[in-house]
Amino acid sequence: MPRIPGTSLALSPWKIIVSVLGGALIAVGVAALVLPGPGLLLILMGLVVLASEFEWAEHRVDWMRVQALGAAEAGVQTVTRIALSTLSALVVIAVGVVWGLNPPIPQIWIIGPDLPFGGWGTGAAIIVGGIIALVLLVYSVKRFRVDGDSAPTPDESGRERSTR
């Protein structure tokens, strides 16, 4: 197995594939934070891929898991929060449909008469983001309100890792 010069690290083909795939998912996720798309989910997916080979990525995944589940639990604590989250996800889906239809808009400075990045490519990405939000909302309601589960704490996450 070839070695990286000046280190004791071995370059296996699998590790290279995992690194490239995980890095690409993270790069696309960072781009999707400012462009339409599920940026945080892509970043998490990239970290999960990297965690299969790198311990530092596994620690980041555990931290993100604790933070995400804590936010999910807080987001479904009241009926008002659930209703507002549902409405927000439906609005995102509606915006995706409008973006896909690409209607003419008034020209304001450099924007117009067409929507920036208008069309079904962008519209579909926005719609998928809204559907993902609805699916995650249903999951959170079932887990934290129906089943009565609670989000893990950072201490619990560390104990899980050490028992593996």
Image (spheres, rainbow, N blue to C red):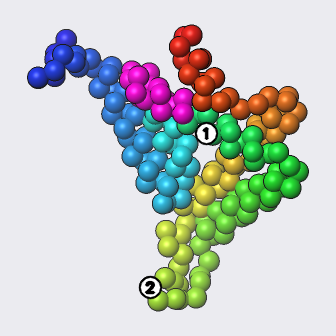
The amino acid marked with disc number 2 is Ile
Apparent side of residue 163 relative to residue 59 in the rendered image (left or right): right
> Which x, y percent locates residue 24?
38, 40
Residue ID for mark 1: 67
Q: Is residue 106 above or below residue 44?
A: below
Question: Closest to the observer: 131 or 6?
Answer: 6
Disc 1 or disc 2, which is closer to the eye? Answer: 1
Disc 1 element? helix
Element carrying mark 2:
loop
Q: Quadrant of residue 55?
A: top left
Left or right of 141 on screen, residue 117: left
The range drawn in magenta is 48-63
- Residue 115 is situated, as x and y percent measured from the top left of the image, at 54, 75
Three-letter amino acid code of the residue under disc 1: Gln
Say which quadrant the N terminus sits in.
top left
Let me know if residue 82 appears in the view.
Answer: yes
Mark on residue 110?
A: 2
On whether residue 95 falls in the magenta region, the answer is no
Question: In the rendered image, which quarter is residue 120 located in?
Answer: bottom right
Residue 56 included in the magenta stretch of the image: yes
Q: What label does residue 14 carry, if any?
A: none
Task: Report how far apart the C-alphas of labels 1 and 2 lie in the structure.
Answer: 39 Å
Residue 121 appears in the picture as rendered: no
Up/down of 5 relative to 22, above or below:
above
Q: Position of residue 95 (x, y in %)?
A: 67, 66
In the rendered image, residue 99, in percent from the top left (x then y), is placed at 61, 68
Q: Residues within 10 Å of mark 2 (few under 14, many from 20)?
A: few
Q: What kind of secondary structure does the magenta stretch mostly adopt?
A: helix
